[in-house]
Image: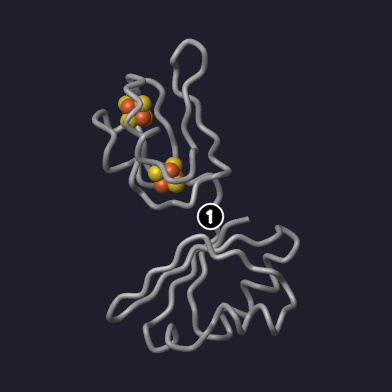
Amino acid sequence: MKLLVTFSSKEGKRPIIAQVVRDTGVLVNVERAMIESNEGEALIDIPEESCRIVKDRLTELGAAVRILEDEILLDETECVDCGACISICPQEVFSFDREFKLQMDAKRCVLCGRCIEICPHRALSRKGEL
Ligand code: SF4
Ligand code: SF4
């Protein structure tokens, strides 16, 4: 299960994820992390059964937590199977089937957003941002 964790840069200077691992005993896989001047953001992957304990501990430490589920959506009526998203995706989420029709394995997605930007037909979007 993927969680998007947002925290102020002040909190980001502390090893917040490491602290959660230590406090909860849950192994956390950090798939993406970015710290800017005022805010930091990390995308983490954890076992589904540990979601509540990890989310609660992150919240106690001052982070905002959003649970992400299949957030990249493909509008098949707009897709022209050009393959641009296959080239740009770092996670190999997209592929062609034998008929060169686009296939998507959303579980691999780390929500970097590159495919949304590159799609010439605006066939990709984040859930809730259609
Ligand atoms: S970039 Fe857009 S139009 Fe091209 S294959 Fe991917 S989803 Fe379809
Ligand atoms: S958001 Fe990033 S990881 Fe997810 S499908 Fe698009 S390019 Fe791939």
Q: Is residue 70 above or below residue 3?
A: above
Left or right: residue 11 versus residue 116 is: right
Residue 41, given in percent of the width and then of the height, sits at 42, 70
Amino acid at the residue labelled 1: Leu
Residue 10 shown left or right of residue 43 in the figure: left
Pinpoint residue 81: horizontal percent, then vertical percent. 36, 20
- Observer-nearest residue: 85 or 50? 85
Q: Residue at x 40, y 41 (%)?
A: 89
Query: Which image quarter holds the C terminus?
Result: top left
Please rate how many residues cluster around mark 1, counting C-alpha atoms within 10 Å: few if below 14, some from 14 to 19, many from 20: some
Lateral position of residue 29 relative to residue 27, left or right: left
Q: Is residue 45 in view? A: yes
Which residue is painted at 45% across and 17% down in the image?
A: 101
Q: Does residue 126 appear anywhere in the picture?
A: no
Task: Name which residue lies at 63% across and 77% down.
Answer: 56
Quadrant position of ligand 2: top left
Disc 1 designates what residue?
Answer: 68
Residue 115: x %, y % from top left: 35, 41
Residue at the top extreme of this rendering? 99
Give above or below for 101 relative to 9: above
Residue depicted at 71% across the width and 58% down the height = 48
